[in-house]
């Protein structure tokens, strides 16, 4: 029996020491996840830590995500303005850190009582955020930019707290197209994407255009909520979709489709979804935001570990979350999967969780909004992204701490072999033969 003067685990003299130890391990996990994103190569990380020193690096990483609440983040016991939060989500694996934080206790640990609300589609998510029905929400990566600019809806300043996931999408086709894998032959096809302002839409358009098809003239692209994609494929309403997981793998599981390619084959490291909220909410609830932010970052740190993926699959599988068979989720999260063509593939980074909202990601998204006519005229790329992603202050603080701040992101953006120069977005848009701009 553990003595009364010891903590619950029996390894510390007091419960206060136990709590401090748990908090320290959580912070270390977050630091490790962010440092891995900043410096992907292990050897370079080691040399960097040796040269700069762990305390300096930790101090800089602690301020990497200021979002108007750096002081609140430093005050772990600051009173929360709001404890009962309502967060919207679409049931897809892209929202893994946000969803798993409920069953695995990350929200509770931060003193939050979070109600996760499964929502039917992205337009409804946008409307509920706009109407202040949700405190925060799972969002497609382009949505906070579009909402802030008033594209597709009234303007509403948004902040991106984290990128929820990288990769995690695929092009899935109906089984009848097994022998029709050349996109040049897809004229007249009907495709589904989850929303206009989605990486799915922009990557599908990019892929088709690179193969000589005009996505607005040669094919039909429809908006279909992700949970309805497999049923539409089965009913022969569409030829395929560029959609989020687990619905690519679910089509294989149900034997109605096959995975043509993973989107990481188009752009390895592309963002998919983000976690965001109204900028006004962040200002009104800085301590609650800090607690929410810590919870989701800790979840992202856990999700980054391949050894945790099976546990996470079981946590997010129930009906109130993804409502999917565990084997389907395990194939997505571990990257060992059947492709529907008789092959078993092993792609560990089929989906991964880099929480950093790199500026370049937002700039690339804006170039595609310009390319396809969603925005007109001059676009203030850097200004818009800095207002939504809020990395400017983070870079300033890293410089003060003696650390080389990332100019854009740790590795170059290369989409289908074509590099993207973040400093020349308009030239990039103009370089495409098929475009609306």
Image (cartoon, helix red, strand yellow):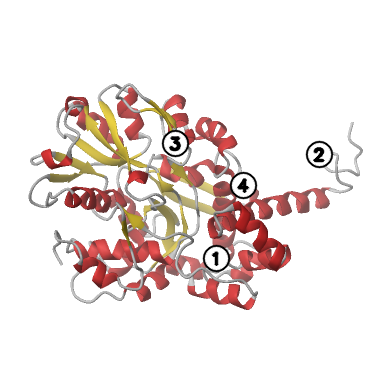
For marks 4 and 1 on the same chain, the one whose residue lies earlier in the sequence:
1
The residue closer to the viewer here, 201 or 230, is 201
Q: Which residue was labeled with disc 2?
A: 9
Secondary structure under tag 3 reads: loop
Q: Position of residue 313 (x, y in %)?
A: 50, 32
Q: Which residue was labeled with disc 1?
A: 65
Q: Which residue was labeled with disc 3?
A: 347
Looking at the rendering, in which quadrant would you find the N terminus? top right
Q: Say which of marks 3 and 1 sits in front.
A: 3
52 is higher (above) or lower (below) than 171 = below
The residue closer to the viewer here, 355 or 70, is 355
Mark 2 → mark 1, Cα distance in angstroms: 32 Å
Mark 4 → mark 2, Cα distance in angstroms: 19 Å
Q: Say which of marks 4 and 1 sits in front.
A: 1
Looking at the rendering, in which quadrant would you find the C terminus? bottom left
Q: Say which of marks 2 and 1 sits in front.
A: 1
For marks 4 and 2 on the same chain, the one whose residue lies earlier in the sequence:
2
Q: Which residue was labeled with disc 4?
A: 108
Q: Residues within 10 Å of mark 4 (few under 14, many from 20)?
A: some
Mark 2 → mark 3, Cα distance in angstroms: 38 Å
For image coordinates 59% across by 35% down, the residue present is: 307
């Amino acid at each position: 029996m553990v003595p009364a003067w010891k903590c619950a685990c029996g390894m510390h003299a007091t419960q206060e020491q136990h709590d401090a130890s748990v908090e320290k391990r959580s912070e270390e996990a977050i630091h490790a996840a962010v440092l891995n994103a900043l410096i992907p190569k292990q050897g370079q990380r080691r040399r960097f830590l040796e040269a700069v020193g762990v305390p300096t690096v930790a101090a800089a990483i602690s301020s990497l995500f200021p979002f108007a609440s750096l002081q609140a983040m430093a005050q772990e016991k600051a009173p929360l303005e709001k404890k009962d939060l309502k967060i919207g989500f679409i049931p897809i694996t892209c929202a893994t850190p946000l969803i798993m934080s409920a069953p695995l206790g990350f929200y509770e640990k931060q003193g939050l009582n979070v109600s996760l609300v499964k929502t039917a589609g992205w337009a409804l998510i946008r409307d509920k955020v706009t109407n202040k029905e949700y405190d925060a929400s799972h969002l497609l990566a382009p949505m906070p930019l579009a909402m802030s600019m008033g594209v597709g809806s009234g303007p509403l300043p948004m902040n991106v707290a984290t990128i929820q996931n990288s990769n995690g999408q695929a092009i899935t086709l109906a089984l009848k197209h097994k022998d029709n894998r050349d996109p040049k032959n897809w004229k007249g096809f009907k495709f589904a994407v989850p929303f206009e302002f989605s990486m799915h839409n922009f990557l599908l358009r990019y892929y088709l255009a690179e193969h000589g098809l005009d996505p607005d003239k040669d094919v039909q692209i429809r908006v279909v909520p992700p949970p309805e994609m497999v049923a539409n494929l089965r009913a022969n309403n569409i030829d395929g979709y560029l959609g989020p997981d687990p619905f690519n793998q679910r089509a294989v599981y149900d034997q109605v489709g096959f995975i043509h390619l993973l989107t990481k084959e188009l752009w390895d490291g592309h963002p998919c979804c983000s976690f965001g909220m109204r900028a006004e909410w962040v200002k009104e609830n800085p301590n609650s935001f800090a607690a929410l932010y810590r919870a989701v970052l800790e979840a992202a740190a856990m999700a980054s570990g391949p050894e945790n993926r099976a546990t996470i699959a079981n946590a997010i599988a129930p009906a109130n979350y993804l409502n999917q068979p565990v084997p389907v989720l395990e194939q997505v999260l571990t990257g060992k999967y059947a492709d529907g063509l008789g092959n078993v593939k092993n792609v560990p980074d089929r989906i991964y969780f880099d929480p950093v909202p790199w500026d370049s990601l937002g700039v690339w998204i804006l170039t595609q909004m310009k390319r396809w006519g969603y925005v007109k005229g001059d676009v203030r790329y850097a200004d818009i992204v800095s207002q939504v992603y809020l990395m400017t202050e983070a870079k300033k603080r890293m410089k003060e701490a003696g650390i080389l701040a990332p100019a854009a992101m740790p590795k170059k953006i290369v989409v289908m072999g074509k590099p993207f120069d973040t400093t020349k977005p308009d030239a990039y848009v103009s370089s495409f033969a098929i475009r609306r701009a």
